[in-house]
Amino acid sequence: MTSGTSKKHKKSEVILICCYVIILITLCLIKAWQVTYTSDFSPINGDFQNYNPIRRLLAGQIPYRDFPVYLGAGHLYIGASLVWLFGNSFTACLFSMEFFTVFCFELWIFVIAYVIIQNKLDALFLSMGYTLINIIRPEIFVSNLIPDILSSLDAGLTVGNSARLIRSTAAIILAIIVLLGSKLLFKLSDKSQWVRNHFSVIMKVLAAFFAGIMILWSNDYGVASYISFSFIYLCIVINAYFGHIRTLFSKTSGQ
């Protein structure tokens, strides 16, 4: 492939990615509008769990001092930013939380698809298609799924009580950080001898740091993400040094 063809291909890919992202954001807006065009005259407990801490933050109160952050700092600060953007009202909170929830749903699909197929465009397409089908719910889609799966899909596109999908996105955010961070470190190791020599240590320290940060995102799901990630990373480390560990065990047992 020539340099000119490569540049055209790269430009086309960027344009396509931008189109997919615009469609994904539009789907978030559509679903949020569906929930709030009547201002949702049947509010549930979760609606007030969302709005009360956000309202107090936007009123100038200090989190953790003036009020408890029950749903985590990620939900609070990103949610407050969206509510402020859309008008700082109860209806704006309904809209913002639904927008945030659908975005998290799309993020889950994208990251899982990308990890499996290793292609950004295909992963974005799958995220877009899966979200669109879940919103439209064609008859062939509904009639061929058992009720438990449908209720799970409903949970993926509704805020519900305690904003569970938003809180559980801590695991996906951690996965994104690890994926992007490892790619960045690999690029830096090609240019820096110091990074190359200390690659393993840097990776472990950064992974542990960001895994710990996720506890702030959500008080419960953040902890669960930290524990799960720590166990997975431990397995990776053991596998990488399995030969050394086996030799150590052999020497110990021989003695």
Image (cartoon, grey):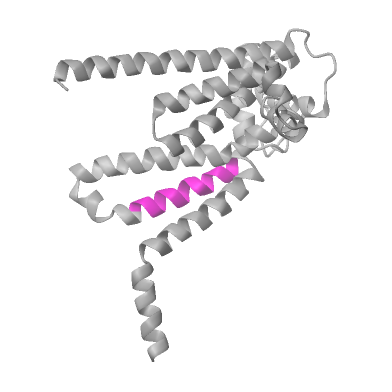
Magenta-drawn stretch contains 207:
yes
Kindly identify the residue that appears in the image at 69 percent across and 39 percent down: 65
Residue placed furthest toward the top: 37
Kindly identify the residue that appears in the image at 75 percent across and 16 percent down: 90
Front position in the image: 184 or 106: 106
Q: Is residue 96 visible from the viewing direction of this image?
A: no
Name the chief secondary structure element in magenta: helix
Front position in the image: 70 or 59: 70
Q: Is residue 13 visible from the viewing direction of this image?
A: yes
Residue 254's quadrant in the figure? Answer: bottom left
Q: Is residue 31 above or below residue 76?
A: above
Q: Is residue 216 above or below residue 101?
A: below
Kindly identify the residue that appears in the image at 83 percent across and 25 percent down: 44
The magenta stretch spans which residues?
Answer: 202-216
Kindly identify the residue that appears in the image at 54 percent across and 20 percent down: 129
Check the picture and name the quadrant holding the C terminus. Answer: bottom left
Question: In the image, residue 191 lies at what x, y percent?
Answer: 18, 42
Check the picture and name the quadrant holding the N terminus. Answer: top left
Magenta-drawn stretch contains 55:
no
Question: In the image, residue 29 lies at what x, y percent?
Answer: 61, 13
Locate residue 27 relative to residue 65 in the image: left or right.
left
Question: In the image, residue 165 lies at what x, y percent?
Answer: 65, 33
